[in-house]
């Protein structure tokens, strides 16, 4: 048995507990919400009580919430996440739910959110690495001070504000990019999904044009933190003896920065990315809402508004998001150990901007 | 050695008769340093002015203008385009369309209707006064920010102090709980719980002290942001509990609870003041986000979150912006308010942190 296996198993076990709790919260919130799930199936204004009762039975919401939760867990363990409450066809005599299977719907939405986050992360990397390096190359210079000032403003800006203002001016006023909506990267044959407002266009060009502002919003939110972090880490690295050796050999500044110092700043960035996945999900919710992109956040909003709470979809999204966060965190932790066996404690530096706590030096 | 003597370049006054030297308290030193930090002072002044403008000022402005934040002005939006009027417009002071209006034809307001001033124009297709709603909305947003922070600090400090002081099993349990809450996608949880909680809690206002929905958001945001203060309190407890002064207190027979209260909690206060300031900004941003997404404050109550979404619509009921109804002010005004407030809170927190830093030189 390899040495890291018990660690991984322990982490996975605790994440299963987290997922169970998360889904339980979703079920309890559903049970406490005054909603009529039967209205997904039939028009409750005209239906007889017997028909309503039948509809509730078809959806499985006639049992006590604990039984529902137990049944859900049992099915989920067997790989079945149920069907959406939202029906593909309605009527008074529906004998079984015709909702779209949750698993496929969640994966599709996850791909959309993944596209936003990945593209945003690439842009973030392209922005923050040069910015951090420039600032670290000449600390306290004009560039450094300007970067610090911009970072302070960036940290204090609500992503919704950035998204709305960019949409308002770039899209609505100057028509540089589409106002909202989504196009799939790959052409789709048929899309019968009710969650799918964007089946009309596809292809890389359309896809990218719809995601351009979302990527910018995503990157702008994180760029302040990351460029400052890279700067702090880089300053630390530049003080190490091997950098002096490199300079003594006559390596030019550019080579010292890019070839010698940069690789050693990658690890903390990696760890930080993993810690920020939860935040990134939140940012994507804002972005998807503003630009109406059918990702996880927008699907959540859809599953909560309108007819009522679409419990299977909400639970499916919760599980998917939770699993992705847990697995990515675990992978990054393992990768960090693999890269650097003498792992340091906290990758977040304590620079002026970043230290939100500031309390640890009080003693 | 008193901390006062450590201050570089500061002359210690030597009284003629008495030779006793008063030690400056850490709070006094911090206050002196803070006053020298121009950015922090400017932020503090801005925040004081904001509170004055938002709490007594909103009412005054409402009286001066002669209308309230929830009044509807159908003539303040474009007749067919629903484009809200821009800043500094006088609109007919009537809350209903003229009775001569038909389904297809909107008649002008009856002659003789007095005009009323919308300082920043209308806030969206509904035609509220944007300026008044900005002020009244500031009340709601600031209340949520401060209230949620206080709740989070109460929960966090209690748990953190218990864990740090008792250690062992309690500490382990808290560590697990913190990991759990940190792993949650907070925004999604807040959305679900915000929609899930019924009208009962939304309507609970502490007998009219707060607006509808404020208490609910305070509780929700506080319940999911306590982990950071908890960690600060715990780590402080761990470093302090084996220090000599604690040992001394124990030697003279002080009980555990009184050591925590009298000797340890005062050490926590600076860190909590600093973190609390920044947390108000975080909670305010969460209020804006959750409300914008439809799970927080509900219309007609004004908040900076509802204002931000007024012109934009809602995720499921979008208002499509066309050249005909393009009006940037309803978006720019709340954006600026949120931005300035958060910058001021963050900068003040940063200034406080440096002022309290014992290693600081300023």
Image: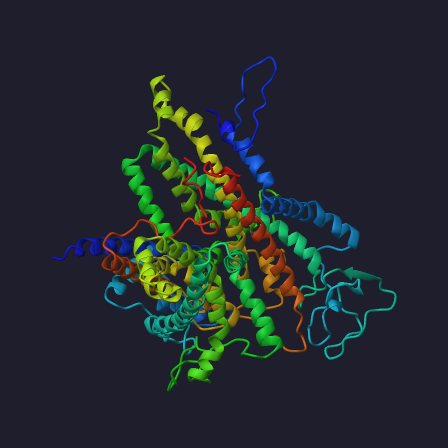
- Residue A66 sits above or below residue A303 on the image: above
Way the structure is coloured: rainbow
Vertical arrangement, residue B233 with respect to residue B331, above or below: above
Can residue B165 be seen from the camera position used here? yes
Indicate the position of residue B113 as horizontal and vertical percent values: 85, 64
Residue A36 in sight in this render: no
The residue at the far left in this view is A1
Position in image of residue A362 (x %, y %): 43, 37
B349 and A349: which one is in front? A349
- Residue drawn where x is 60% and y is 40% of the image: B36
Q: Is residue B91 left or right of residue B216?
A: right
Instruction: State the residue at coordinates (46%, 31%).
Output: B266
Farthest residue in the bottom direction?
Answer: A189
Quarter containing the N terminus of chain A: bottom left
Q: Within the image, what quadrant is residue A255 found in? A: bottom left
Closer to the camera in the image, B199 or B60: B60
Count of marks, rendered view: 0
Q: Quadrant of residue B21?
A: top right
Q: Is residue A34 left or right of residue A326?
A: right
Residue A29 lies, in percent from the top left, at: 42, 56
Q: Nearer the viewer, residue A67 or B68?
A: B68
Report x, y in % for residue B342. Answer: 56, 53
Q: Determine the residue located farthest toward the top in the rendered image.
A: B17
């Amino acid at each position: 048995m390899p040495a890291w296996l018990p660690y991984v198993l322990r982490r996975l076990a605790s994440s299963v507990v987290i997922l169970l709790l998360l889904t339980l919260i979703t079920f309890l919130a559903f049970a406490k919400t005054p909603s009529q799930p039967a209205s997904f199936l039939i028009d409750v204004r005209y239906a007889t009580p017997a028909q309503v009762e039948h509809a509730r039975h078809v959806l499985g919401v006639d049992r006590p919430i604990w039984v529902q939760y137990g049944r859900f867990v049992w099915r989920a363990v067997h790989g079945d996440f149920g069907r959406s409450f939202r029906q593909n066809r309605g009527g008074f005599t529906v004998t079984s739910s015709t909702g779209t299977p949750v698993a496929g719907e969640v994966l599709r939405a996850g791909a959309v959110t993944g596209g936003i986050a990945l593209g945003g992360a690439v842009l973030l990397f392209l922005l923050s690495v040069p910015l951090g390096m420039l600032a670290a190359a000449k600390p306290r210079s004009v560039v450094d001070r300007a970067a610090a000032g911009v970072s302070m403003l960036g940290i204090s800006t609500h992503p919704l504000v950035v998204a709305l203002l960019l949409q308002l001016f770039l899209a609505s006023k100057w028509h540089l990019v589409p106002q909202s909506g989504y196009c799939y990267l790959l052409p789709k044959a048929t899309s019968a999904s009710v969650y799918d407002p964007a089946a009309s266009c596809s292809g890389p060009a359309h896809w990218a044009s719809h995601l351009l502002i979302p990527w910018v919003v995503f990157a702008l939110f994180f760029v302040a933190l990351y460029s400052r972090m890279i700067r702090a880490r880089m300053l630390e690295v530049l003080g190490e003896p091997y950098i002096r050796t490199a300079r003594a050999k006559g390596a030019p500044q550019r080579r010292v920065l890019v070839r010698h110092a940069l690789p050693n700043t990658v690890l903390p960035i990696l760890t930080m990315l993993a810690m920020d996945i939860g935040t990134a999900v939140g940012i994507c919710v804002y972005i998807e809402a503003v630009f109406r992109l059918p990702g996880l956040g927008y699907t959540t909003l859809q599953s909560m508004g309108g007819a009522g709470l679409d419990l299977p979809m909400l639970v499916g999204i919760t599980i998917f998001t939770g699993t992705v966060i847990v697995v990515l965190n675990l992978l990054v932790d393992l990768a960090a150990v693999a890269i650097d066996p003498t792992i340091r404690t906290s990758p977040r530096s304590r620079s002026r901007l970043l230290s939100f706590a500031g309390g640890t030096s009080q003693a | 050695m008193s901390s006062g003597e450590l201050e570089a370049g500061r002359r210690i006054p030597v009284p003629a008769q008495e030779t006793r030297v008063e030690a400056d308290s850490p709070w006094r030193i911090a206050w002196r340093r803070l006053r020298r930090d121009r950015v922090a002072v400017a932020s503090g002044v801005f925040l004081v002015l904001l509170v004055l403008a938002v709490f007594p000022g909103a009412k005054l402005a409402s009286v001066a203008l002669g209308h309230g934040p929830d009044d509807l002005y159908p003539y303040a939006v474009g007749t067919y385009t629903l484009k809200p009027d821009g800043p500094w417009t006088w609109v007919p002071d009537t809350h209903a369309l003229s009775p001569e209006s038909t389904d297809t034809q909107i008649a002008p307001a009856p002659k003789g209707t007095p005009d009323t001033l919308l300082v920043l124009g209308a806030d969206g297709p509904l035609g509220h006064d944007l300026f008044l709603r900005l002020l009244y909305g500031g009340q709601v947003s600031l209340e949520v920010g401060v209230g949620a922070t206080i709740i989070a600090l109460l929960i966090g400090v209690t748990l953190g102090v218990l864990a740090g002081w008792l250690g062992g099993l309690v500490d382990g349990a808290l560590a697990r709980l913190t990991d759990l809450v940190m792993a949650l996608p907070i925004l999604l949880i807040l959305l679900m719980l915000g929609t899930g909680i019924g009208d009962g809690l939304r309507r609970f206002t502490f007998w009219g002290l707060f607006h509808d929905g404020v208490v609910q958001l305070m509780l929700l945001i506080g319940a999911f942001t306590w982990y950071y203060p908890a960690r600060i309190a715990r780590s402080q407890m761990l470093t302090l509990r084996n220090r000599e002064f604690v040992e001394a207190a124990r030697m003279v027979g002080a009980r555990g609870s009184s050591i925590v209260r009298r000797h340890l909690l005062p050490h926590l206060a600076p860190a909590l003041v600093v973190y609390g300031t920044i947390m108000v900004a975080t909670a305010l941003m969460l209020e804006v986000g959750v409300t914008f997404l439809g799970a927080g404050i509900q219309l007609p109550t004004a908040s900076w979150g509802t204002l931000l979404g007024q012109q934009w619509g809602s995720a499921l009921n979008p208002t499509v912006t066309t050249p005909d109804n393009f009006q940037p002010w309803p978006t720019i005004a709340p954006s600026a308010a949120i931005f300035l407030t958060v910058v001021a809170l963050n900068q003040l927190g940063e200034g406080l942190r440096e002022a309290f830093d014992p290693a600081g030189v300023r």
